[in-house]
Amino acid sequence: MAASLFGAAPGAAPALGAAERTIAVVVEFGSGQGLPASFALCVKEPSGATDAQALTDALVSRGLPAPTYSSAGLLCTIAGYPSTGCGARAPGGYSYWAYFHGGSSRWTYATDGPAERRADPAVPEGWRFEPSGHGNPSDAAPDRPSATASICPSTASPANQPASPASTTIPPSTVGVTTTTTSASTATTTMAPPAATVPVTRVTDRTAERPAAPAAVRPSAGSLTGTMVAVAALGLLITIGVVLTRRRRS
Amino acid sequence: MRRERTPHAVAWWIWAAGLALAALRTSNPLLLALLAAAIVVVCVARTPRDLQQSPLATFARVALIIILVRVVLQIVFGQRLPGHVLFTLPSVPMPSWAEGVSIGGPVSIEGLLSAITGGLRLAVVLLAFGAANALASPRAVLRSLPGLLHEVAVAITVALCFAPEVLASVRRIQQARLLRGRPTTGIAGMRGIAVPVLEDALDRSIQLAASMGARGFGRRPVSVSLARERTALATLILGSMILLVGGYGVLAGSSVVPGAAWLAGLGLAAVCLGVGLSGRRAARTRYRPAPVGLRSVACGASGWLSALLVVIAGVADASSITWSPWPLSWPQVTPLAFAAVVIALVPLLVAPGEARVAAARGTKIAVS
């Protein structure tokens, strides 16, 4: 099988090529002015991968920053949005990324986390930013349809799909971008499913522009002084502690 | 009034509580490590030398175990957010209804760092209380509780004395049975030890009750009105409940309980009012009360100033006290957070060193 040939490619995800499935990921930035465009992504994942892995791969494959999480494991940003705060209190509730499970008829507010959820081709993962959400199922669900068939039409019959490289990080250049100008409620693609040789990862964008992605949160060389000074102080304190303990014992 | 030589026992506990609060407010491993180092240095430098074994060592051991347990739990059952995978454990597939539980799977650097940081936070809290235990005995603190809590303090003191006495009692009876060639292990041994230990405990509690009764414990002075006492108690209970809710809000971040800081302040005021109302209630004297002076105030305030600085650093720049391994980055310590660590070291200046205390006590030691 082709998958097993490509599966051992360097830098590829665990060689589980034969069991790869296409996972649909919907990211919506909520309603409001000046927000980045929302998008839907389809990404190939080995069986056993989690929704969190699928989200990371989907974003990275588009050249967007990977999602960040708080120390408690709460998802803070998708594609670098929002730039500040993590589940911060907002007028009327909290501003946070709500997580939904898709289905054939509607989105359901997730009762688990993306890292606990095994990615399921039949259950797209939906993310919607709630500027003032309540943190319960009353929060608004994504506008896009919830069924895999409408998000990733080409994967409606997985059995007919050709095996693709196990690598999930497909460079953005190979990602087919289709632009639709349809209303929010019907995100029908204007393009027929790509030919069998094209990688299955497809992106349907509501607008042509990409979400505004701030630079990845990574300290520059200059801001490392805070770390250096603190490490030096820590070393000094530990030395004092050791010397004092020795002196008391003697 | 005697001159204050060392900070009051309560001051040390207030200092430690402030530092524990500072540690609970941050998830920055570098800041946590600095706080831990500051606590250990102050404790090692200022623990009375006559202490046989410092409780800090015991607490430090427990703290290490906590970090280890967190790491092992993370490896086996942990949260498996995407990251740099170190190794992959064989995983047990779970049925769909138990998908939230993961047993085995990829172990990432990020997950391990998150577990270590979480454990470190609890470790610093434990170290703070270990240091408080070493610097001032909990019994000295109970001695200085306000009159309203006198009965509670006595009950806690009795309870604190109970465990070591039971252990001593068990050891004594075990030795006696060994000498007589009776079994000390197994069910027969347990029965042989449990009955005398219980008898011993009953005897001692009757003796304790008698001696407490002889010293007038639980006697209400005639001069205090019952209504006033009840008001004081109600205010105290209500105040501590509000303080509990507000304190939880302050620790968990103000997004959980609205106006948490105000609630905590209100609760604290109510507690002070309750204590004040009942202030003159207990007609009892203290043997050689420890004086409270500038040293104690500076010592207690430094811990809470440190916590306040950490909170202010967090308000000014949330990323300076919160750190997350997703994405991986070096933890930063801003000047404000650094100042919090320096302030935590103030007791080193305020409390006299071992040599000076010994010099001040010198004459007395020579006489006795």
Image: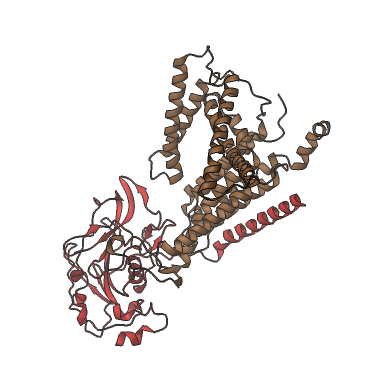
Please state the total of marks drawn on the protein image: 0
- Left or right side of A248 for B241: left
Of the pair A22 and B112, the residue shown nearer to us: B112
Of the pair A120 and A83, the residue shown nearer to us: A120
B293 shown above or below A153: above
Q: What colour-coding does the image apply?
A: by chain
B98 shown above or below B295: below
Quarter containing the C terminus of chain B: top right
- At a point 17% along the width and 74% down the height, the residue shown is A190
Of the pair A174 and B21, the residue shown nearer to us: B21
Picture coordinates of residue A65, whole percent (x, y): 39, 67
Quarter containing the N terminus of chain B: top right
Q: Is residue B327 visible?
A: no
- At a point 33% along the width and 82% down the height, the residue shown is A165
Chain coloured red: which letter? A
Picture coordinates of residue B311, whole percent (x, y): 50, 45
Chain coloured brown: which letter? B
* Residue furthest to the front: B181
Picture coordinates of residue B14, whole percent (x, y): 58, 38
* Residue furthest to the top: B223
- Left or right side of A134 for B349: right
Of the pair A250 and B24, the residue shown nearer to us: A250
Which quarter of the picture shows residue A181? bottom left
Picture coordinates of residue A150, whole percent (x, y): 18, 69
Which quarter of the picture shows residue A47? bottom left
Q: Is residue B317 visible?
A: yes
